[in-house]
Image (cartoon, rainbow, N blue to C red):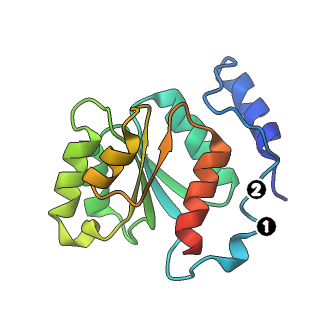
Amino acid sequence: MPHSLSSISNNLSSEAGNRNPFPLSKNFTSSSIFNGVNSNRNKHILVIEDDTVILEYLSKLLEWEGYLVQCASNGSDALKLLQSVSPLPGLILLDLAMPIMDGFQFREAQESDGRIAVIPVVIMTADRNVESKSMKIGAKDFVKKPLDFDDVLSTILRYYLN
């Protein structure tokens, strides 16, 4: 049975000491509309984010929506994971500002590896120039921080439904 995002958010807020990085305004779930999804893409998502609270929230919320989620806290860890995982994720959610290897460096390395270059990327950033940065690194789409989970889900669904 799908959970409403508000009930999930309330549960996660209490687990995270009431630091809720996702304002949830709608009672939206993707499971009811996932029948139209392009079946050539899997519901496996790699989330690359250095903020552990955002990473945990996003991971749990996406899992509750029926996605298989793998996580990395920087681009370097993500590349190592991608080199060893099979099947590859159907989508990558990528933070741009991270230590060790940022989102720009990750995209450069991803695009140079034919096996993982085909995985589409959605960037997550608070940068005001998100649209130009998204185009610059060849991302399929973007979501602005602070993240609104409804926006994250609708962005993911736009990708999967097209």
- Tell me if residue 72 comes above or below residue 121 in the rendering: above
The kind of residue tagged 1 is: Ser
Q: Write down the quadrant of residue 89 in the picture.
A: bottom left
Of the 4 image quadrants, the one containing the C terminus is bottom right
- Tell me if residue 67 comes above or below residue 9 in the rendering: below
Could you tell me if the residues under marks 2 and 1 are in contact, i.e. CB atoms within 8 Å? Answer: yes
Residue shown at the point (31%, 32%) measured from the top left: 98
Of the 4 image quadrants, the one containing the N terminus is bottom right
Which one is nearer the viewer's eye here, 13 or 128?
A: 128
Q: Is residue 58 left or right of residue 142?
A: right
Residue 32: image tag: 1
Residue shown at the point (64%, 20%) measured from the top left: 19
Q: For mark 1, give the secondary structure.
A: loop
The kind of residue tagged 2 is: Thr
Rendering coords of residue 119 (x, y %): 35, 66
The residue to which callout 2 is attached is 29
Q: Is residue 2 left or right of residue 125?
A: right
Q: Is residue 113 left or right of residue 149?
A: left
Q: Residue furthest left?
A: 112
Rendering coords of residue 3 (x, y %): 81, 50
Q: For mark 2, give the secondary structure.
A: loop
